[in-house]
Image (cartoon, rainbow, N blue to C red):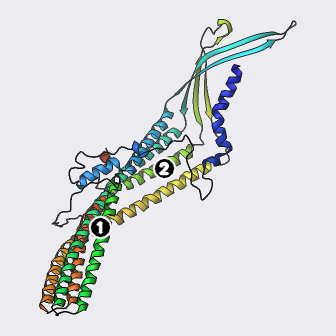
Amino acid sequence: MRLKHSILLPLFLLSGCAYDAVDPLSLAPSGPYASWTPLQGNSLVSSRYCQTILPPTFETSDLNLAELLDIALQNNPSTKQTWAKARNAAAQYGQSLSQFYPGVKLDASYYREKGTFISFGPPEPYYYTQAGPDLILTYTLFDFGQRTAAAMTARQALYYADYTHNQNIESVMQTVMDDYYNYLYQIAIRRANEANLVNAQTSLDAANEKFALGLAALGDVAQARTQYLQSKINLTTQKQTVENAFTQLAVDIGLPANLAFKVQAMPDQIFADPLLESVEQLVALAQDQRQDFLAAQSDVLSKEATLLGAKRAFLPVFSTTLDAGHYWFEEGVDEHHFHWNAAVSVTFPLFQGFYYRNGIRKAAAQLDQSKAQLLQTELTIVQNVSNAHMGVKTAAQNLDDTNEYLKAAELEYNISLTSYKAGTATILDVLSSQSSLADARSKKAGSQKDWFTALASLAYATGSLCSNPKEFACESE
């Protein structure tokens, strides 16, 4: 009866696995036109397990950029992913160090045998029992540096994951800053469109008034009305653009897009007087601070250690084993002393179908790939710094020029409108100056956004969004 149960229980436990092995296609969609539905009993992870961390003043005050960055670093899913990858790499490095320690294993057994003893008389049954533990200790004495190479590979892979996490933090910070300034820019464009609509209404009223007095043709009214409707459409469209910018900002800081919050407005007056170092100095700074460049360097070192390990993989490994235990037998009989045995062995792979030779080639190819990636990263850094350096200068110049442009456009519009009312200018002069004023407002808002985003781009390009990376001060906690 016990034998029957012992056979049926494993069959019962493995029945589900056996069904999946026989028909694994049942776990896939039934066709290219069909979607997959989870089987009954499957549980899906819900977003309710992801806690959102918000500051106490989230709903009561306007959030500044620093508060938005703090929210993003605590809630953005991408930083959580790279943090988990870094912890995984740390655990793998810890596992690689286990080879330097002796392995200890407890091997306990119970053996029961029933047999038949045949002699000159009738067969007689007999029972034999053996039970006892064995303590087994194994240790690698010498392996020509294979353990060291594996540990070096894992350690540099850990640094790569750490630097990648740091770089992801900077990427999130830059994304949030771009979203923040883009949202404020879209709000500024909406306000500019509102002002443009007011100007268009003023021009239309002037045209209607002159037409009612018989001092203007109907074409003046038609042209002014066309400009008015154009401004109205632009304002309506811009409201949707503002909403899109807000939802993008919310998603990138790790919040639901339908969660309402307010941010601080852009200052009315912005003064730009950049004092920049040379491109060469900024490139040197970036090479010391850019986390992706440091990660690429660690990846090269990791691949070098992998190649070293591949070259040593076919060398002999000397190891030792110590086995000690005590056994008990039938009817209370046991060993009077502990038994033990010790052995020293050597493993020397002589031939395995060119496996080790191709392993060296594979590791060498991976190293070449990592070196090429390091070079590509360095070239990208130089390009980013050069573009950001020029971007700051351009943004500063545009900021001054657009302020003057707006003043000139406002003056031109007021003069043309006054002249039109006095009969010394045409409606085309008014509409032309009105278009210039609308363009000046848009360019001023764009120059303000470009100034802040240029500064953020330069900080990102030089790796300055985080503190000194050599002190591991760039963390998401």
Q: Is residue 186 left or right of residue 117?
A: left
Q: Which disc is residue 304 wearing?
A: 2
Residue located at (69% from left, 26% from top): 7
Instruction: Please tell me how crowded label 2 is: few (under 14), some (14-19), or many (20+) other residues with Cα within 10 Å.
Output: many
User: Which amino acid type is shown beneath numbered disc 2?
Assistant: Glu
Q: Which mark is residue 440?
A: none
Task: Quarter of the image for the C terminus: give it.
Answer: top left
Residue under the point 45% across and 51% down:
299
Q: Are marks 2 and 1 in contact (CB under 8 Å)?
A: no
Q: What residue would you read off at disc 1?
A: 239
Residue 15 in percent (x, y) is at 66, 35
> In this orientation, does residue 126 appear?
yes
Q: Nearer the viewer, residue 243 or 173?
A: 243
Q: Is residue 332 above or below residue 37?
A: above
Relative to 131, say whether 238 is above or below: below
Q: Earlier in the sequence, mark 2 or mark 1?
A: 1
> Nearest the camera: 219 or 227?
219
Is residue 350 visible in this depiction of the protein? no
Q: Residues within 10 Å of mark 1 (few under 14, many from 20)?
A: some
Mark 2 residue element: helix
Q: Nearer the viewer, mark 2 or mark 1?
A: 1
User: Residue 290's quadrant in the figure?
Assistant: bottom left
Alpha carbon separation for disc pair 2 and 1: 55 Å
**Residue 271 appears left or right of 117:** left
Most foreground residue, 334 or 97: 334
Q: Quadrant of the N terminus?
A: top right
Residue that appears at 54% across and 34% down: 142
Nearest the eye: 387 or 182? 182
